[in-house]
Image: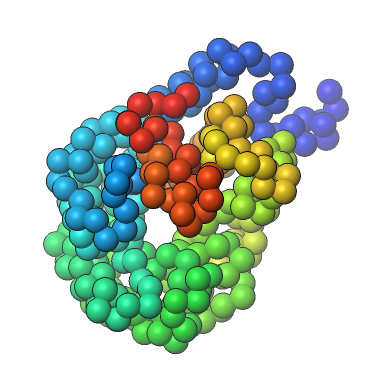
Amino acid sequence: MSVRAGKIKALVGIDHANKTSEELKSLFKKVLENGMHGLCFSTYEDGQGPGTQITEAQIRRRMEIIKPYTKWVRSFSCTDGNELIPIIAKEYGIKTLVGAWLGNDEEINEKEISGLIKLAKEGYVDIAAVGNEVMYRKDLTEDELLGFMHRVKMEIPDIPMGYVDAYYEFSHRPKITEACDVILANCYPYWEGCSLEYSLLYMKDMYNQAVSAANGKKVIITETGWPSVGELFHGAQPSHENALKYFINAQKWSEQDDIEMFYFSSFDESWKVGSEGDVGAYWGLWDKNEKLKF
């Protein structure tokens, strides 16, 4: 093999072509047990969804499952029981990226921001995320989002603060990028129709675009993953095997290049079918019954 060919192999990830299913499962287990930087915390059980009151018991049960495998956990909301996630994570020695979920409801937005500030002042927040894909959904104007960001930064000046959105938004919206202490970028080759074969190379390009926009600020990949069930999305095929391969490649890259990455997601969640189609319910490493899928 030439040096250049070796470089190309490194860029696209591990060659899984000749591996049996059992060999892939064994490699997955080895990578999982080696540990992840971060994991997005899926709270909702069957019959639950946004707006459901989450119990301490279900958070503790799922935190117990993931704690051997991750250094950080990411939560998405500071209301309806989700505010307990960072509190419980800290009990287990897990660092926290805590999000305030912002939308088009002013009352809920106020509760979320107040909740985030309260948790941070009590010592439960390592990184504060003000909103998730708000610009993508067009739930707020840029100035409205910036107002929330400036408010949080003023209240908790010593805690890194950022905003989560698709990687390309940070080059399109320099005011938001400037307001962030840290750039929190979602990178999904799947949702851009990339085939599994080239997905790692594609994610690296997404990450590098965010780095270019960041002007020297740290970039964290706050979401990436691959669904295990669903219909073909352009060139991207959901499957048990592809989800397994994507996880292995993503985690190997994260480890080798010291990329701070939160994998999406911990557990399958049935409620997401409505918003994302049939693939929505199958992004977890564990299934909805909390059993490891691979």
Q: Residue at x 33, y 62 (%)?
A: 99
**Residue 89 vertical position relative to residue 18 in the rendered view, above or below:** below
Question: What is the x, y in percent for residue 94?
Answer: 26, 43
x, y percent for residue 278:
53, 45
Q: Which residue shows up at 51% across the image and 16% down it?
A: 26
Q: Position of residue 233 (x, y in %)?
A: 67, 47
Q: Nearer the viewer, residue 230 or 43?
A: 230
- Residue at 21%, 35% in the rendered image: 61
Residue 154 is left or right of residue 293, and the answer is left
Res 253 → quadrant: top right
Q: Is residue 37 visible?
A: no
Q: Is residue 233 left or right of residue 71?
A: right
Would residue 99 appear left or right of 16 to someone viewing this image? Answer: left
Counting the numbered discs, the total is 0
Q: Nearer the viewer, residue 166 or 241?
A: 241
Instruction: Identify the colour scheme used.
Output: rainbow
Examine the rendering and report whether any part of residue 206 can be seen.
yes
- In the rendered image, residue 121, in percent from the top left (x then y), is placed at 17, 66
Question: Dividing the image into 4 quarters, which one contains the N terminus?
Answer: top right
Which residue is most to the bottom?
Answer: 143
> Residue 15 occupies which quadrant of the picture?
top right
